[in-house]
Amino acid sequence: MRVSDRAIRFGLKPIVFVASLGPFFYLVWAALTGNLSANPLADLTNETGVWTLRFICITLAITPLRKLTGWNPFIRFRRMAGLFAFFYGTLHLTTYAIVDRFAGLDQAAGWVEALSGGHVPGGALVASTLRSLAKSIGEDIYKRPFITIGFATWVSMLPLAITSTAGWIRRLGGKRWNRLHRLVYLTGILGPLHYWWLVKADVSRPLTYAAVVAALLGVRLFWNRARRAPAPVRASATPA
Amino acid sequence: MLIKRAADIRSSEITDKKLYLNRREFLGTTAATAAAVAAGSLGTEAFLEAAAPAPHGRKLENVKKSPLSVDEKPNKWEDITTYNNYYEFGTDKDSPSMLARNYKTEPWTVAIEGECAKKGNMPLEDILKGQTLEERIYRHRCVEAWSMVIPWVGFPLADLIKKCEPTSKAKFIEFTTAYDMKQMPGLRSPVLRWPYVEGLRMDEAMHPLTILVVGLYGEVLPNQDGAPLRLAVPWKYGFKHIKSIAKIRFVEKQPLNTWQESAPQEYGFYSNVNPSVDHPRWSQATERRIGEFLRRKTLMFNGYGDQVASLYSGMDLKRNY
């Protein structure tokens, strides 16, 4: 497929960008208009998590797609997909921190009171809240394996997001940058594991993500092997 | 901030499902490959939609108020009829509200079995004959750390037990949910071993707080909430409140309830609400009351300790979770 550089930069990329924000705007809209379930806070946590997984899968799918289709411009969407995975992952982490941890703190009632009265919470309240929140999240990460893995998934994306700029590629050099960004394979493994350990009985969805990631990593492994294998000796190449 | 440009576009335009599908189509048509198939399978999850609350049913007559009701604001009908764990109708919270809509609950009989004098099939009308219905506004605490306040309509389980005349060998009571492959699409997936089974110790079953539920908000119980007959044991986690009861068996040995069978290290037989015994994977110390932002501190025995704590005196509740 022939697509000009201009069409990609000014056409396709903005379209994909806006489409990728779709889930975010959908969630904001649904939350504000009461179109989520009776437990909207749980929905926000779940949905941002699921979209993180989807974007991790999309990111991992780009290289195989490019190879299979031979359409090289796919690569120009890889960074965007990866950054959207990080974007939804950060939303997921933030939602968890607020909805699951902050809302359970003794200080939370003070915040609601202050904010609903139109006041800014006092410095002492802010300080003690931050301390309790850090402790609460820290304990949760320490105590609960699925939270540990979830947090590790987000942490694994952090260096990739930071070094996603052209400047960082230059600074690190292509080879080292490439090596660092293989960390995304770990992200791909940890994400579905986090989901898996969270669900109560129905593991079909976590399994789907695990299977997709397994296929996307498997195909890389397969190609790597194929490349390293010695080229077959062709009989016709030897002169009689 | 990583996303540099804020999109200047109305959210209603973006959230359009068509657009979302277009993107998938784009992927699909550009590359008819294994990877696209994978992406497609990820998209099969239904987009979140607001489930429709249950239609209002027949009004129940002569429902008495009960002193055992709590003095808290009940959750809305919409909440109680769209946010259900009822795996026979799917594992999503809103699937029962969609998939149980045409579930047929009339006529209904309950098989009475085991250590009792009056074995046999008991039609629901007979169970309800001469029975005064009461409104019981109970706190309801799910093992998933959310809770509601629900105005059930029902009658003490003890009344039915007496009718069955259990023998001295009846130490426990075992309930079984209806198992109807044709009507319950959730049964097709082996997430739990079907049919669903729950149980109570005889003294728990005879406790005045333990009720069989036939109504909600003064009306006939909606299908997604376990019609036509379900259990409510308000000091226990929600999964003990077995729905759509088709069989009651009096037994000598402690029954193996479905969730315990599924994950014995996570779900026990007693499953009393207990803030100091965490689920292995999450804390039970706090809960989200549906409709609220701040999490509440979970109360021992869900706040019914004064009435039920004596049932467990001398028992190690950390081991008997």
Image (cartoon, coloured by chain):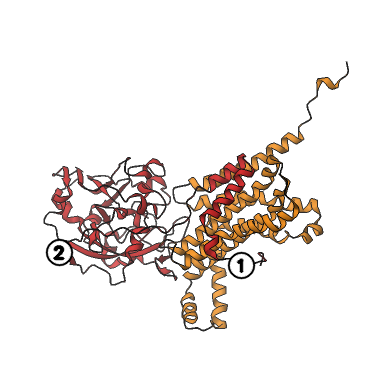
Chain colours: A orange, B red
The residue marked by circle 2 belongs to what chain? B
Residue A143 vs B183, above or below: the answer is: below
In this view, the residue farthest toward the top is A240
**Mark 2: few, some, or many residues within 10 Å (few <14, many ≥20)?**
few
Q: Looking at the image, how many numbered discs can be counted on the residues? A: 2
The answer to whether any part of residue B253 appears in the image is: yes
Report which residue position mark 1 lands on: B8
Frontmost residue, B26 versus A145: B26
Q: Give the distance between the C-alpha atoms of the residues marked 1 and 2, in whole angstroms.
A: 58 Å
Image quarter (top left, top right, bottom left or bottom right) of the N terminus of chain A: top right
Quadrant of the image containing the C terminus of chain A: top right
Q: Position of residue A80 (x, y in %)?
A: 67, 56
Task: Name which residue type carries label 2.
Answer: Asn
Q: Quadrant of residue B276?
A: bottom left
Label 1 neighbour load within 10 Å: few <14, some 14-19, many 20+: few
Q: Residue furthest left?
A: B130
The amino acid pointed to by label 1 is Asp
Badge 2 marks a residue whose secondary structure is loop
Q: Quadrant of residue B3?
A: bottom right
Expressed as whole percent of the image width and height from the top left, the position of residue A37 reads: 42, 61
Can residue A145 be seen here? The reply is: no
Please provide percent x and percent y for residue A222.
68, 36
Mark 1 falls on what kind of element?
A: loop
Q: Of label 1 and label 2, which has the lower sequence position?
A: 1
Q: Decide if residue A110 is on the left or right side of residue A75.
A: left
Mark identifier at residue B62: 2
x, y (%) of residue B134? Answer: 19, 63
Between residues B179 and B17, which one lies in front from this camera angle? B17
Tell me: residue B120, above or below residue B225: above
